[in-house]
Amino acid sequence: MSNHQLLKTKHRRMISESFRLGALLALVGGFLDAYSYMTRGEVFATAETGNIVLMGLNLSRGNFPMVLHYLLPICVYAVGIIVVKTIQESANQYHLIVVHWRQIVIFCEACVLMCVYFIPQTPRANLFANVLIAFVSSMQVQSFRKLRGLGFATTMCTGNLRSAMDRLYSGISKGINREEIINSLRYLGIIASFVVGVIISYQLTARWGTHAMPFAVCILIIVFVLLVREPREFE
């Protein structure tokens, strides 16, 4: 078997890189973004670009209290990355954990989101809730970065859209490359899953407000179960 075939076999076996699991996580990403906007002060908590821009604007105006307001979720997002790396390296080093390290991350995400469920809707409480959602987003982005061997994101769409068009161009510019076209469709499918998550979030939060959060937790439970079959020899 050639190296290329071995690589394709590896990606087929990696549940964490499968389209099915990526679509579920993108569903959660879309849900959380709409949830934070609809119920937690009209902010998008899963990506920090907006917070960095607003922090810079307030810094230029000398509005230092608002600088700290936006700096907090950025710092927590960064901490989430470090937490995931710590979990991964500890699991690989000691081999004492009976579940895959990504399952530990998903379990932590579900627990944090259940904490968000109990946070009341006040300006200060919403800030804390959005910080926790940012933490969950960073853990998810760091833990699930590949889609069949290709880079992708589960809580934002800009990079996925760029990759979709890049792969589509590669697939049609010099004759039909079926594999590249399929890769483009995978990226578009992830974006579609994100949009579905937004739609579901809108419908559920319109009816139940902040109490819609268990939907995201249930999806994460499904992801946790799917990861039972994740092989470890490729870690």
Image (cartoon, helix red, strand yellow):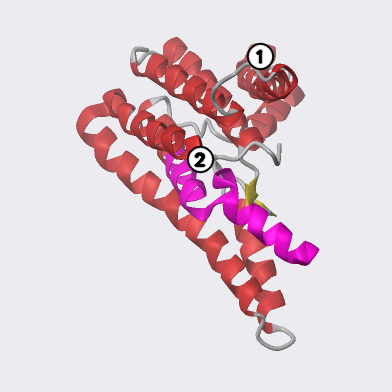
Q: Residue at x 43, y 30 (%)?
A: 36
Image coordinates of residue 223 in percent, x first then y, are: 44, 37
The one of 51 and 57 positioned closer to us in this rendering:
51
Q: Find the residue positioned furthest to the right.
A: 3
Three-letter amino acid code of the residue under disc 1: Leu
Magenta stretch: residue 27 in it?
yes
Q: Which of marks 2 and 1 is nearer the N terminus?
A: 1
- Per the picture, the main secondary structure of the magenta-coloured stretch is helix
One can see residue 148 in this view: no
Q: Do the residues labelled 2 and 1 touch (CB within 8 Å)?
A: no
Q: What residue type is labelled 2?
A: Arg
Q: In which quarter of the image is the N terminus?
A: bottom right
Viewer-proximal residue among 114 and 116: 114
Separation of residues labelled 2 and 1 (CA atoms): 43 Å
| Residue at x-position 71% and y-position 65% | 5
**Residue 214: where, in percent of width, then height?**
31, 27
| Crowding at mark 2 (Cα within 10 Å: few <14, some 14-19, many 20+) | few
Q: Residue at x 65, y 72 (%)?
A: 180
Residue 190, compared with residue 220, is above or below; it is below
| 200 is within the stretch colored magenta | no
Can residue 224 be seen?
A: yes
Q: Please identify the residue farthest to the bottom as the structure is shown.
A: 175
Q: Which residue is drawn at 32% across and 33% down?
A: 215
Element on which disc 2 rests:
helix
Q: Mark 2 points at which residue?
A: 229
The segment highlighted magenta reads 1-30
Q: What quarter of the picture does the C terminus occupy?
A: top right
State the image coordinates of residue 168 (x, y, percent, origin top left). 64, 73
Judging from the image, what secondary structure is the residue with disc 1 in?
helix
The tally of labels here is: 2
Asked if residue 209 is positioned above or below residue 206 in the image, the reply reads above
| Residue behind mark 1 | 68
